[in-house]
Amino acid sequence: MAEAAAETEYVDHPLLVEGFIEDRRYQTELAATAREGHTLVCLPTGLGKTTVSLLVTAHRLYETGGKALFLAPTKPLVQQHADFYREALDIADEEIVVFTGEVRPDDRAELWEDASVVIATPQVVENDLVGNRISLSDVTHLTFDECHRASGDYAYVYIAERYHADAERPLVTGMSASPGGDREEIAAVCENLGIDQVEVMTEDDADVGEYTHDTDVQWERIDLPDPIVEIRDALNEVITDRLESLKELGVTNTTQPDVSQKDLNRMRGELQRMMDGGDSDAYTGMSVHAEVMKLRRAVELVETQSVEALRRYFERQRNAARSSGASKASQRLVSEPKVREAMRKAESFDDLHPKFRRTRVLLAQTLGIGGGERVIVFTESRDTAEALTEFLSASFDTRRFVGQGDKEGSDGMTQKQQQETLDDFRAGEFEVLVSTSVAEEGLDVPEVDLVLFFEPVPTAIRSIQRKGRTGRQAEGEVVVLLANDTRDEAFFWISRRREQEMEDELRKLKGVADELTDELDDGQSGLEEFEGGAEGSAEDGSGDDGAGGDGDGDPDSATASTSAAAAANGQPGLTDFQPPEDDDDAEAETDAADGTDAGGDTTERDDEATADDAGEDDDDAEADDGVVATAGTDADGTEIVVDQRELESTIARDLSTREGITTRLETLAVGDYVLSDRVAVERKSVADFLDTLVGGDRSMFEQVRDTARAYARPVVIIEGEDLYGERNVHPNAVRGALSSLAIDFDASVLRTEDEADTADLLEVIARREQEENDREVSAHGEKGAKTLAEQQEYVVSSIADIGPVTSRALLEHFDTVEAVMCAREEDLLEVSGVGQVTAERIREVVGSDYPE
């Protein structure tokens, strides 16, 4: 082996740094195949899937031109790949750019134009596509790292759909060490990404085997001490009692506390069906079911994690029960005598879960007696990760590694902190890394001597990812701790079964890769539904003609063809409902809304979920205040402005795929969608609408009021079925709310069945307004009659899109619009809510020469 190492050969290519990429035959063979078509590359973790993609990227950039896009699910992983590409590719570093939520959207749009390689999180690229900031037309190689995520509504699916539709010369490479649990899952991933060939190499292949070493997996069983068993048993008694209640409702036949999650999911489904049928007892049952789920989580923590994790969980439940709007399940949980007894026992327990001591012994054996250098400890719970870090730090140099999202009582890690921690671990600055799931997928965590699972992982993909951290350069060891007579037992057998199934499936997949390739469609699943923009969304799948056109790819004929099709069936079409001549008097402003500043979103709108322990990007957070939609100058066809926070639904993605529709993202002060200079839409699900009626939250009416003050034709879309039956709300209360929206706020109230139906309706209204009525998307709506204060706020809020909240703060500080305009940067920084970036943008807008 020493002689072979001395004769190491390297890949020679004009775009690769000389002597950097080792020439491994299995990598070059995989890359050669991936150059020829859309390919799924299955390769064990740590054996260079990224190198395969790099080789394909170098080939495409050199032979075809364009740019390459590399997608990875977490920010640390994106940064890691960017560092590798900058080291390996012989192109200027500034041509390899990173896109995460920390880069402003306007900056991303500019960077995109000049980049040769973009390495990004999928959420950011999804947002930029929906917002029409970037185009995939010249992307000649798209890589999906950890592509097993490509299912459901995950951004990979949408991006692949857009790529195959928009790119002139598309080529997709999907990469994963564990693409799915069975053949159907793997086929679904391929179809979702538009992949039509599969290449699999396992450690059984000779070319791969010489680069791998055996990984010894040991399962260590641990007995629980009596105090922990007593806490567990007290909680299980309450679970049994609650299951008795559910049994009386007829949704379960068992009262055993170890009831499976599958059975609990079935119970919930049955309760939902009862609720849909108007059974009022089902609402109580659903609350009891929620309590059972909370109790099971508590049992799992005390059995498999630590008493400290249970204590923190109980504290969160107590806080939740004391909060306004607390659920009955939370209140019952903390008031139940047996649960309170378990809480007291947990508080008084001054010993450690036996897994803690066993972890310390195993680390001592590896790092001390065994002369090892590095160990990773994985745990499912952040609470346990922090408790373990504190405990192990007394004996070893230990650091934690968790996700970016802050949780109650626990701060997340920034991307910079994550990167610094990994760099220090690689450099040998500390010995033990205690990590949650954030380090599972693909991160270049250095070779370690031991991977310790604090608990079994029931998902084969995650277990295989974790084991990939060892055994790459030398023989490694994996130890899984298992508490006897606990849920660990179930997870143990599930894990063993699923891992064996995946290993068998990969071997089978390798043998039948050609057959699977033949089964896959040449194009991505569902792409044909979007051609011509007429057939609705992929989720819809109905095949009914929508308002977007007739599927012939002619956006200009969309509305006419829809009307023609309807007329053929004896039904009127869109053109049969021509609007009357514009009547300014008909747009008189209602006096119903008073006492609120115009243009301000007076209610809290939650930003998109921040990164969880997997480190995913949150939405672009460059602006805290909303803006009223600005006019688009470059849009072709019909433009729909979408509020950033609407990205949680599929509507914006659906609209962005339709011919002749251009979507643009804004953080809107009023409305969820702006369709013209006079039409803005507030979208509410049936559940959200009814919550407004029963919860005392008047936010919906405030939002509609503000929308009505900025736009002459406010529209409220209520999405979903069974408006009068979903909740136990008197029909007259529903009718009263609908009447108020229509009469008091002059809003049109429209109903849709689901998100696909809503998207169809938005398209119809937008086309009707912009194409037939020749209206534009307005900068600030067209309604007037604002108060002096509102007009002053309107003027100031338009500066650099700072929004109404900051505008009010500036006016309160400086008194006049003139003073705001003349303020120096250092004076602006004295205003609450104005930071350095905002102050600089204000001065840039106010003080810069007008470009000619």
Image (spheres, rainbow, N blue to C red):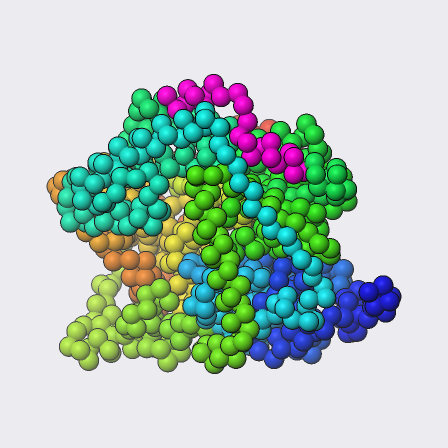
Q: Residue at x 64, y 73 (%)?
A: 30
Left or right position of 541 against 804 = left
Predominant secondary structure, magenta span: helix
Highlighted range, magenta? 341-363
Q: Check the picture and name the quadrant holding the C terminus.
A: bottom right
Q: Check the picture and name the quadrant holding the N terminus.
A: bottom right
Q: Nearer the viewer, residue 787 or 67?
A: 67
Q: Is residue 510 visible?
A: yes
Image coordinates for residue 777, horizontal then vertical, percent: 40, 58
Image coordinates for residue 167, horizontal then vertical, percent: 54, 73
Q: Quadrant of residue 110?
A: bottom right
Image coordinates for residue 109, horizontal then vertical, percent: 59, 59
Residue 345 shown in magenta: yes
Q: Is residue 111 visible?
A: no
Q: Residue at x 42, y 44 (%)?
A: 669
Q: Residue at x 60, y 28 (%)?
A: 830
In this figure, what is the number of numbered marks? 0
Residue 134 lies, with reference to residue 748, above or below; the image says below
Left or right position of 602 against 148 = left
Residue 473 lies, with reference to residue 339, above or below; the image says below
Left or right position of 108 against 711 = right
Image coordinates for residue 822, horizontal then vertical, percent: 60, 36
Q: Nearer the viewer, residue 389 or 597?
A: 389
Q: Nearer the viewer, residue 98 or 474?
A: 474
Q: Quadrant of residue 521?
A: bottom left
Residue 695 lies, with reference to residue 614, above or below; the image says above
Q: Residue at x 53, y 63 (%)?
A: 503
Q: Quadrant of residue 377?
A: top right
Residue 512 shown in magenta: no
